[in-house]
Every structure is written in structure tokens, then in C-alpha cells.
Amino acid sequence: MTECLVEAGTVLRGMGTDGRFVIDTDAAILVRDGKVAEIGDAQRLKAGYPALPRFGGPGMIAMPGMTNSHHHSGVTPLMHGVPFAPLELWLPQFRALRPIPTKLDTLYSAIEMLESGTTSVQHIHGGVAGAPTAWRAEADDVLGAYGEIGMRAGFCFMIRDQHILGYGDDAAILAQLPAAEAGLLKAQLDAAMIPISELMGFFHELRAAYGGRDDVRINLAPANLHWCSDAALEEIFGTAKAHGAQIHMHLVETERQANDAEARFGHSAIAHLHQLGCLGDNVTFGHGNWNNRADLDLLAEHGCCACHNASSGLRLSSGIAPVNPMLGLGIPVALGIDQSNYNDDRDMLAEIKLVWALHRETGMFNPRPDAAKVLQMATENGARTAGFGGFTGRLEPGRAADIVLLDRVKVERPFVDRRTPIEETILHRAKSGAVEQVLVGGELVVDGGRVTRIDREAVMAEIGARLAAAPTPAELQARQMVAALMQVLEATHRRETPDTYRPYRYNRMHD
């Protein structure tokens, strides 16, 4: 479709200089070649373009599509039977997850995102292993799924070259396992230990294959400080800078990670990256729950972004990012749902409610984000961190026509006073059931609250059948390996981790 009109009683363009969204009423959006060509009076535009296909209507609220700025996979760990635990005791259990075809897995989470108004995603793939042909097949399946359903995707793959199992030498962990389990685990680790130069070659291959597309950005994701050597970090960050790519790096997600950096380097993780010359305006740090005030000063000085994963931090006992101090320093904050949010899905309309409430710190006059600021995190800021900055995230002429249409009656039922700012109404009352239509690049990808390009029920049915099947011998062996591994890891962390528990202490701003 080259042209269409999208009508709405209220259009939210994006954050204005006054801290409120710029709003048009009784308006229509003229879409041409996938971009917003004009926003103006609905009656005038309908009269001027009577033959164009029309979407929306006067009872709709139009807002920019949102971005899930930190996402990994579709079928959630809980669905796989993995119990919640602190991060260091949760991630290793993924080694026994039942394999789901990559395209099917990606489509599942994409359904949840699109149907709740998320049109773009930073997809952080778990990593690559084995032969390079397999790497490319995985990437093509992920990006093919997003392309098929109609989402934009920033794609990156997590890069590690050390300490995969914990914070020290993997050999020390393997030595404590029974021989069969140690052999199986070592084979997995060896397959994933790929020279950084080869991974940068894969990055260049993906850039060459997908670089000309409006719906894809190829980014880089050093997995975390303890998982990457200094040499690896310098090569990754240098490659990104040379090619104008975005970096998305997990960092100080847990207090244990922050303490490890201090012990290894004598200063914080951010200070270490600063010494390596890794900070810059193309860099986003995911989580950041345990950054200190000096760290935030460095992030602000170098124009770095932060990605706040609120549900993840709470579910995994990881902590709460210091969002209010970040905002006070002008650090752009985006929002990510990570593996899943508190509903165990990828509903950004639910996540923004949590983010708003989580940072209502005590005090009468201290700064805290309002609804407009949180919506900016979910739209414009998120688009920037995924590589779509200046292209989408706002409804303005020249930007992509990524538009979410909310049924105002469903949002406001039974009544909301017109004095209530529309941003507050959306944040507090809009649920995924109010999402009527979603357009990406002017193409209708959600209609009547359901994705239009794929058979959503067939996706759900296939996933259900695969997860319900009896475990294979290989899967049973993987579960046995993980059970043995968890005993060793728990004992190791008990020895190495000091008891720093204090009630309601959730980040370093309270030290």
C-alpha cells in the first residue's frame, strides 16, 4: 500500500519541549510510501483524498508504536518449567530448555508485542554456536519471522569469551561435576567459544545482507563485563563505532555483578568501560540496577542510554534501576521486557504501568517520571536504542508510519474527565484489549486486536503440542546435567557471595 489515511479523535505525536506530548484533535494522518506525509484536520484530509483506504476513526487515539528495547526469546522460562531464582541461579537452567524452532519461537513473542502496540524490538539473540552456516540460519529465521508478521527489529547476538558459567574459570566448575555431565557441558561451552574476529565477520555478513532494509538494524551485544575480556570489548566497541552500529550490553544487573567488577578492577564496571574507551552515544546499557552516582555521571557525560527492565529486576531479585537520578542527569531511558514481564508475556502497556509506579519514591516534591515521560521511554527513546532513532518513535512528517490505534471508549469506560491529560489516561487505563489496529510503515498488521499476517492460533497450537510432548532421551540427559550443575553453582555462590541482604535495599542509591 502506497497511500492511506489514518483518522483519530486524538493523535499523540511525541514529547514536546514542555514535557507533554504534542497533540492533534479531530485529525488524520496522511501516509505515503510508508511514512507520515502530513498530520492535519480530518475533514480536510478526507475531502482532499476521498479515494484513499482509511483506518481508525474519530473514536480512536493514535500514538507512536512502542519499542521493546531488550528482548531475548518467545516461549518463556516459566512455560518451560524453569522456576524463578536470582539471576545467577536462573540462567544456567536454560541449558535444559526444550528446543523450539527459532521462527516459531520468535513469532510467539511477536504476536504478544504487536497486539499490545509494540512495533519495534531490540532482539538480543542468546548467542551463536557450532558452524557459521547455523549462525546465519538462526539470524535469518529470527528476522524472517519479524518480517513476516510485520515488525521492525534491531538484531544482535550475545558475545562471550570467558567465565560462561559464573564469575571465574569454567574449568573449576567442570572439575566438580560427574564425568558424563562435565563432558556434555564442556561440549556445549566449546561449541560457543568462537574467536571474536570471526564473530565480527558474522556481524559484517549480516550488515551486508540486511543493511538496506528499513525494518532491520544489525547491532552488537557484548554479553556482560564478566563474560568478556578487555580485548574482546575493545574489538566489539571499536567495530560498532567504525560502522555506526548500536551497542546493547547487559551490565551490573545484580549486586553480585557490581561487586565482581569492584573486586577485579578496583572500580566499578562503568569506570572500567570508561578506561577502555567504550562509552559513547551509540551505547545502551541494559538493566544497570547497581550503578552508583559516579557511574551515572559518566553515562551522562558520554551520551549513553539506559534500558530499564523493571519486571525482570523484580522477578529475579536483581534490583531496581536508579531511573529518577538518570532522568535528572538527562540520560535517555528506554524500556525492555527482557524474557517476559510480570504477566509472563510481552505486553508493553502493562510494563509502562509498573515503571510509572515503581519510581514514585517517597517525598512530596522530589522528581519522578510522569506518564508522558514513561511513554517517551517506550516510544522515542526505545526506537533510538534499537537503531531506529530519527526514523520511528514519533508521529511526524518524514518518519515511519508506525501507528497504534486505541479504542477510546474501551480505554475510558465508563468515564474519564476531559481534564485528565491523555498521556495519563493511556498509561493508567489502556490495556492490550483496547488496541484496535496497528500499522507499521503504513501497512495494517493488527486489525480488531489480532495480527493479520499469520495464523496466530496455529502458532499457539504448535507450541503447545511441542511443549506437551514427552521428553526425549537427549532432553532428559540435559536435565540431569543441569541438576548436577546447579548443585555445584549454588555451593560456589554460597561460598563466594557475602550476605549483604538488607530489607528493601534494591540499588546503590541507598548505600
Image (cartoon, grey):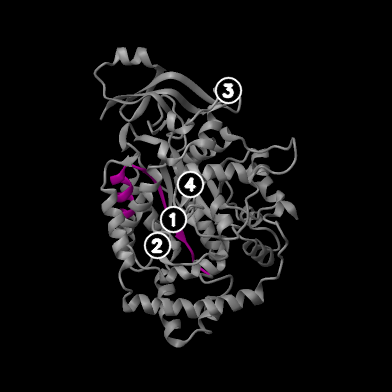
Which residue occupies the foreground of this view, 21 or 360? 360
> Mark number for residue 72?
1
> Mark number for residue 419?
3
Mark closer to the chain start, 1 or 2: 1
Secondary element at image label 2: helix
Q: CA distance from mark 1 to mark 2?
A: 22 Å
Mark closer to the chain start, 4 or 2: 4
Residue picked out by circle 2: 198
In the image, residue 159 lies in the stretch drawn in magenta: yes
Which image quadrant: the C terminus? bottom right
Residue picked out by circle 4: 69
Q: CA distance from mark 3 to mark 4?
A: 32 Å
Q: Residues within 10 Å of mark 4 (few under 14, many from 20)?
A: many
Secondary element at image label 1: loop
Mark closer to the chain start, 3 or 4: 4
In the image, residue 141 lies in the stretch drawn in magenta: yes
Query: Visible in this render: residue 175?
Result: yes
Mark closer to the chain start, 3 or 2: 2
The furthest residue to the left: 51
The magenta stretch is: 140-162
Residue 320's x, y, as percent?
A: 63, 52
Give above or below for 198 relative to 277.
Answer: below
